[in-house]
Image (cartoon, grey):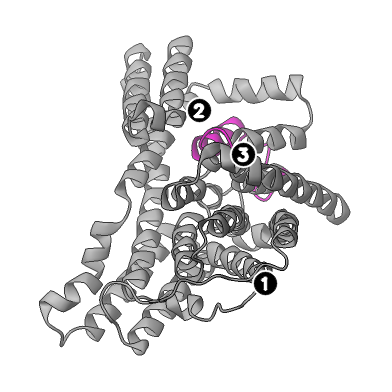
């Protein structure tokens, strides 16, 4: 049975990694993999009640992540529908490319921590199209945006799916991950950003002839500001909600979503149905990336079978015996996340190492949040942000390898070194 489970998981994993060549959506591969793995596990078990109980436990933890992501994605869609991100983007103006590079990198870094790395990448690359007419310049900016978005997501409990998984799973706490990973994340961005800004020194910003900052339906300044600050306020308040009430984060995000829905309906209550339809929460729910949500559900349920059958525990023991050092193991996991999706990698790591041996806010979990979050920048296919940038700006895989991968790798290793040094000094 164990051999069959491993073989099926490897095949499903390969199908996910080779999504584009195979032209099969990774969500389909994840769901089929989860279904086959649980079927094999159930058919070979002697007590079906134990299997049902384990599936119930796995479903509960998976659903919490899915509901949280659904709420966060919907809030971001509502803000975007109201052109709320113009509150930030319209203030970015400069004549020098190197200065613009620093501004974009810093804004992306902090915006990613508040929203998520995928959404931030889409927003910032869309902005670059309105500020830069030269495609070659936009490619460099897109590369830095990917690095900055992944770095920003790594130190925030709501900035990256993998960090959110660790936070909801109880492996990290919000205050601790911010204080511990913030400086390494800054270094992982500052190093490649400095090098790229130096390369672009002296070059002038070549703007398109017409710049139209609005998209979609026109909204008033009051509506834009209200939805922007409320949306960000709700996202930022969720960690505080969890700390004060000790309730799971998904309830906080759904509570906030309800408040935003109520305010939105009140603001638009006197408008024509045809006009206000595109600004409602109901419309935002129809626009969120359900394919990604289904992928997370499938891959987490698939990994759960390896956890319940103790395959992941055996893998952790093998790594401990053959590699030995925990920091090297986590560093390798981060490097591998550049090749394959970091969500199943982190899900597997959460199953490999239990909270009894490695309690909340242990070195392992904090370093894993950093490595899995920033390691995906090394290749453009290694993160959701990279894949989004690849599609938006038509970035070629080998161009990214030649121009950006080396910068991302230097930043990744520099940040990792800073984290290890910081941990040794503080402990």
Q: Quadrant of residue 8?
A: top left
Is 25 positioned to the left or the right of 168 in the image?
left
Dot 1: element: helix
Task: Verify whether residue 209 appears in magenta.
Answer: no
Q: Which residue is mark 3?
A: 401
**How many C-alpha atoms fall within 10 Å of the one at disc 1: few (<14), some, or many (≥20)?**
some
In percent of width and height, residue 200 lies at 69, 61
Q: Which residue is mark 2?
A: 307
In percent of width and height, residue 307 lies at 50, 28
Is 38 positioned to the left or the right of 123 in the image?
left
Of mark 2 and mark 3, the one earlier in the sequence is 2
Q: Is residue 295 above or below residue 272?
A: above
Q: Is residue 150 above or below residue 91?
A: above
Of mark 3 and mark 1, the one earlier in the sequence is 1
Q: Estimate the spatial distance between the alpha carbons at disc 1 and disc 2, rounded to whole Å.
A: 48 Å
Provide the residue span drawn in magenta.
338-363
Q: Residue at x 43, y 11 (%)?
A: 4
Q: Residue at x 55, y 35 (%)?
A: 345
In percent of width and height, residue 373 lies at 60, 48
Q: Which mark is residue 99?
A: 1
């Amino acid at each position: 049975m164990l051999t069959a489970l491993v073989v099926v998981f490897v095949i499903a994993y390969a199908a996910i990694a080779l999504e584009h060549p195979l032209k099969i959506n990774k969500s389909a591969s994840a769901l089929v993999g989860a279904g086959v793995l649980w079927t094999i596990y159930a058919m070979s078990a002697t007590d079906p009640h134990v299997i049902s109980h384990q599936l119930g436990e796995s479903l509960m933890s998976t659903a919490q992540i899915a509901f949280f992501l659904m709420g966060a994605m919907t809030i971001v869609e509502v803000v975007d529908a109201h052109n709320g991100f113009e509150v930030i983007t319209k203030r970015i103006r400069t004549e020098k490319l190197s200065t613009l590079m620093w501004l974009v990198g810093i804004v992306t870094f902090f915006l990613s921590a508040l929203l998520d790395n995928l959404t931030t990448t889409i927003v910032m690359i869309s902005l670059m199209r309105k500020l830069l007419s030269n495609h070659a310049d936009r490619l460099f900016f897109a590369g830095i945006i990917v690095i900055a978005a992944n770095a920003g997501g790594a130190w925030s409990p709501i900035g990256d799916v993998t960090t959110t998984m660790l936070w909801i799973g109880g492996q990290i706490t919000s205050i601790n991950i911010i204080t511990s990973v913030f400086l390494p994340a800054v270094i992982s961005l500052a190093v490649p950003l400095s090098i790229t800004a130096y390369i672009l020194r002296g070059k002038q910003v070549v703007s398109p002839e017409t710049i139209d900052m609005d998209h979609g339906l026109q909204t008033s300044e009051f509506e834009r500001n209200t939805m922007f600050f409320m949306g960000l306020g709700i996202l930022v308040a969720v960690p505080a909600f969890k700390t004060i009430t000790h309730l799971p984060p998904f309830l906080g995000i759904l509570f906030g979503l309800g408040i935003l829905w109520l305010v939105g309906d009140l603001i638009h209550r006197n408008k024509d149905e045809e006009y206000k339809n595109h600004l409602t929460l109901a419309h935002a729910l129809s626009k969120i990336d359900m394919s990604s949500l289904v992928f997370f559900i499938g891959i987490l349920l698939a990994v759960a079978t390896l956890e319940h059958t103790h395959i992941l525990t055996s893998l952790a023991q093998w790594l401990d015996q053959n590699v030995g050092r925990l920091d090297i193991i986590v560093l390798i996991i981060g490097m591998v996340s550049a090749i394959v999706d970091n969500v199943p990698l982190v899900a597997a790591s959460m199953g490999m190492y239990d909270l009894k041996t490695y309690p909340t806010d242990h070195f392992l979990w904090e370093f894993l949040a950093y490595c899995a979050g920033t390691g995906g920048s090394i290749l453009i296919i290694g993160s959701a942000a990279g894949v989004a940038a690849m599609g938006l700006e038509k970035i070629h895989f080998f161009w990214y390898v030649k121009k950006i991968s080396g910068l991302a790798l230097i930043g990744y290793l520099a940040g990792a070194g800073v984290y290890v040094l910081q941990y040794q000094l503080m402990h």
